[in-house]
Image (cartoon, grey):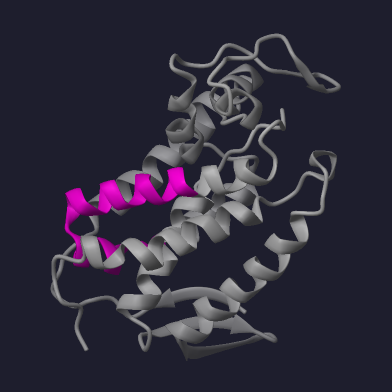
Amino acid sequence: MFPLGDRNIPGRGPALVTLAFIAINVAVFVLLQLPSDAFTYGWAAVPAEITPGRDLVDVQIAPGAVLTDSPEPVYLTLISSMFMHGGWLHLGGNMLFLWIFGDNVEHTFGHFGYVLFYLGAGIVASFAQILIAPDSRIPTLGASGAISGVLGAYLVLFPGNPVTVFVFRFLTSVPAIVAIGMWAVLQFINGFGQIAQTEETGGVAYMAHIGGFVAGLVLVKLFATRRPPV
């Protein structure tokens, strides 16, 4: 089941912060990451740096992959990593989900509250991933943790909102609780399986998705300044 669109709140105008987040993510990937691997290995969040609060430099983590200087303090990578991606598919998938589900949440939270919520969910997501591998030297990056928080908030605010999805070669419409609920179930199944993996297995940061999603469920009532339409 792959989401392609939803029903937007009428009369609210463009979701400026969501559009800005998308533009920043694309710009960081195209202008900073593609030209230089050094940027990626310096500004992504590395658990082995976050846990002791100490930058690791010139540490080889894979053939041809060496950690470079990070910003000071190194905790800033918890934010910078939210706007970085591992490839075009990673970027495109995340931005599609943000485009579909971000606008209604932004219009409910207000622009400023939405910024705080998004960054907060992303930070919680990073710590959830770090918790299962605090000494890992593998960089973590991507907007999916913060976007998972958006999905959690969307599920609480708009459980019955129709979402257009592609499934079994057909387009159909399902309630958000079905579209997001099935996504969440997969994250929890894969996330708890990932706990037993070693860092060498790599792959998707499912625990970050779980952490961001739970943060969205918990924090939504603190940021919802407007009542969503029934």
The correct choice, above or below, for 221 with respect to 98 in the image is below
Q: Position of residue 192 (x, y in %)?
A: 71, 62
- Residue drawn at (46%, 26%) of the image: 75
Task: Residue 220: say if magenta.
Answer: no
Q: Nearer the viewer, residue 131 or 156?
A: 131
**What secondary structure is the magenta-colored segment mainly?**
helix
Quarter of the figure with residue 58: top right
Quarter of the figure with residue 47: top right
Q: Position of residue 218 (x, y in %)?
A: 36, 65
Q: Position of residue 147 (x, y in %)?
A: 45, 56
For the C terminus, the quadrant is: bottom left
Q: From the viewer's perspective, is 54 left or right of 227?
A: right
Q: Position of residue 4 (x, y in %)?
A: 49, 73
The correct choice, above or below, for 200 with respect to 162 in the image is above
Q: Nearer the viewer, residue 202 or 220?
A: 220
- Residue drawn at (43%, 75%) of the image: 5
For the N terminus, the quadrant is: bottom right
Q: Nearer the viewer, residue 171 or 83?
A: 83
